[in-house]
Amino acid sequence: MLYSYIKIAFRNLRRNKLFSILNVLGLSAGMACSILIFLWVADERSYDRFHKDASHIYRITAQVNDIKSAVVPVPLAMAVKEAFPEVKMVTRVVPLQSMVTIGARKFEDKQILYADSNFLQLFSFPMANGGPAPLFKDPGTVLLTESGARKYFGSPENAIGKTLHIDNDYTGNDLMVTAILKDIPVNSHLQFDMVLPIQLYERTINLSQGWGNYDLYSYILFAPAFNPTKNAIAGMEKRIMQLHEQLDDSHTKATLRLQALTDIHLSPGLMLDVAGQGNRQQVNTFSLVAIFILLIACINFMNLSTALSAGKAKEVGLRKAIGAKRSQLVFQFLTEAILLSFISLGLGLALAWLLTPLFNQLTGKAITLPFLSVNWVGMLIGGVLLLGLIAGSYPSLLLSSFLPVKVLKGAKVMHGNRSFFRSSLIVVQFSIAVILIISTIVVYRQLTYIQKRDIGFNKNDLVYAPIPRIGDLVQHCQALKTAVAGKAGLEDVTFISHLPTDLTTGTKFVNWEGKDPLSQPLFCQMWVDYHFAQTFKMQLVSGRFFREDAVADKNNLVVNEAALKILGVDANSALGKKVTIGGAPAGEIVGVLKDFNFKPVQQPIQPLLLRNANDGNFNGNNGYVVVRTGLNKLPRVEAGLQAAFQKTFGDFPFTMGFISQDLEHLYLTEQRMGKLFNIFSVLAILVSCLGLFGLTTYATQQRIREIGIRKVLGASVTSIVGMLSKDFILLVLLALLIGFPLAYWMMQRWLSHFVYHISIEWWIFVVAGISAILVAFLTMSFQSVKAARANPVKSLKAE
């Protein structure tokens, strides 16, 4: 029986080749796009779920005033472990870049973690040999990943027992490699090539007493008996804050939160967090786009199938007359729908496989189609069955409901309510298309606004090179600056502690006259030399910048406009105001810089203190020399900068970067989102057009005799095209009325995640409306004009 159903289904598909092709093209394109999007979504949501105890691991985060931070007071984690029996284990982590020396070879490695000895017991990073994870309490040991071992020693096997030298903040350390980890999965928020004992980090700060030092990531593993429900987590947060208030000798008012390990990747926006995070809003947006595309493809199928039901009416009537049951007819037409779905799935998988390299290039991922995954294949088969049942349900029920007596007498079988159903589907389809058109325009304009917005300094022609963190950093920077000065192609030279695109340090130990003693605002800070503002071409609002001939400038400060709001002064009255940072001598504010962006525009500009690099606190930070080049002089600049670097630092590795490229990288995720959104929106609109083309073809076939009669009576091609298009255009206009407010609401929510954003202007809706009408009209015109220009004799010769 099933074989008979499948055989008849194939026969029907061959009989209606055009509509079958349109259905397969629409469904396969929709499936291919949806498969790629859902694989990307699954990858984004898979971060850190490979850890054995992922559901019970949380990270403590802090909020001080308006600043939310991923780091917390250094002693907090240990205090939490001692105070609460629900906590099984805690571990602390801090990422740092350091110079690694092996024999005569030197490496500047940014993939280094300092961690507690139980780091590999809390997390489930597997060992290369498959054995149990070791405790590394010996401060003279180091763990490498397989990639790290290959980079430093050629192979993991050669690395065990070997020694490398780490130049950390103030002193170097010889460390022995004792274990090799497998390479860290790409879906881990922590990425590293090397793990060092946190005891080495103790040489820079007092870990036991530093309650005012927000410096470490702190992770908690709850005991198996603890059920991390929403209420339980809220209760634990309250208890942790109470503990913090009791123990914090710096009297900082901080709101402490527990962040689930599996939420970290999709929860950006925390200060001092790990790099390379995702965006939950984008994941949700593309999930919606995938659903929209599938919905449009299903609507195409249902519309074309219901439109064709009139052509199958006599077949249904004849089958019923010879005793076929309604259930048999329903099963027959559902078989046809499911068969079509599986054909579309095969083509869709092939299309997705072909598009995967391009998709990976656009998203920066390494996604593959998991054909060997039983779960994935099962989900695909189940999804296609469900899709076929949903898409074929209405047409099959409609066809099986025809009365054989009326059908065989030639009575009209398509009633108004069925036409209304098809019309409703068209409205839904084009409402989605309109939403996507408006969204595409808004996303493009917002991304353009981000790229062209004045960031407060001239980003072009700025080249930088990191300086090795060895010895006296100020002396090294001065030496390099002297060596660089006078090189061909260089206009200005400065050295700084942090790049404006990677400013991740701050302090709350700032005091001034009139400060609220209960307030502990967090200021970002960076150390700069005298030529910083000149090199970056920044604008002073008031006062001056640091001067070499001003001895007092050693402890003086320059602040940005955002800092004035915290200090409670304006740009002029701020000059001369005494400010103390930590235990450093008090200094005066000598200048106010115009606000400049050192964070992505999704985040507000934060208060910033610029400190003189000669104040004695520059060592222990990173160091960069930044030069402004002349036009078209980059090759000479690169050669000159490298020669000066090698003269100063010998064989230390030289790397060079561009501020403009770093700024572009800050918005790389948004740029990728914009490209993907444009591509998938166009594909969704094309799929909609396939359905409209099919319906127009069917409508012209149904009215072919009417068209012939009208032509005989003198109707023009234009009037016939207008007659055939009128009903569809009215449906598109109705779709505009529904799509406009929905698109406005959705895009307003999306823009609200940006601190600086465009407004949604009226002309966007005009452009979207005209585009939708034009696309619909052009799609319909092909068949309408063809029918209107046909010889009426062919359509009327049988009358």
Image (spheres, helix red, strand yellow):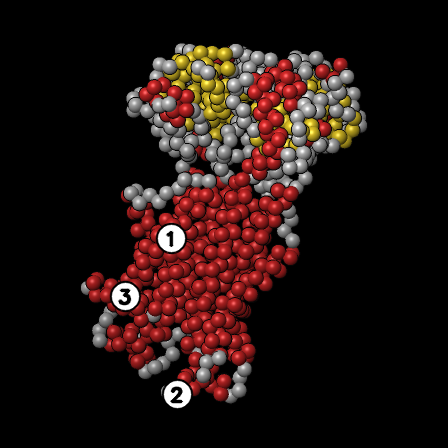
In the visual, does 457 lie left or right of 308? right
Q: Which of marks 2 and 1 is in front?
A: 1
Query: Helix, strand or loop at disc 2?
Result: loop
Most distant residue in the left direction: 1
Give the residue at x 36% y 18%: 159
Give the residue at x 38% y 20%: 153
Q: Earlier in the sequence, mark 2 or mark 3?
A: 3
Residue 9 image label: 3
Q: Residues within 10 Å of mark 3 (few under 14, many from 20)?
A: many
Give the residue at x 66% y 41%: 453
Which residue type carries mark 1? Leu
Query: Helix, strand or loop at disc 3?
Result: helix
Task: Look at the picture and state if 437 lies above or below 62.
Answer: below
Instruction: Give residue 406's quadrant in the image.
Output: bottom left
Viewer-side residue, 680 vs 654: 654
Marks 2 and 3, how far apart in space? Answer: 32 Å
Which residue type carries mark 3? Ala
Q: Mark 1 points at which residue?
A: 351
Residue 590 visible in image = yes
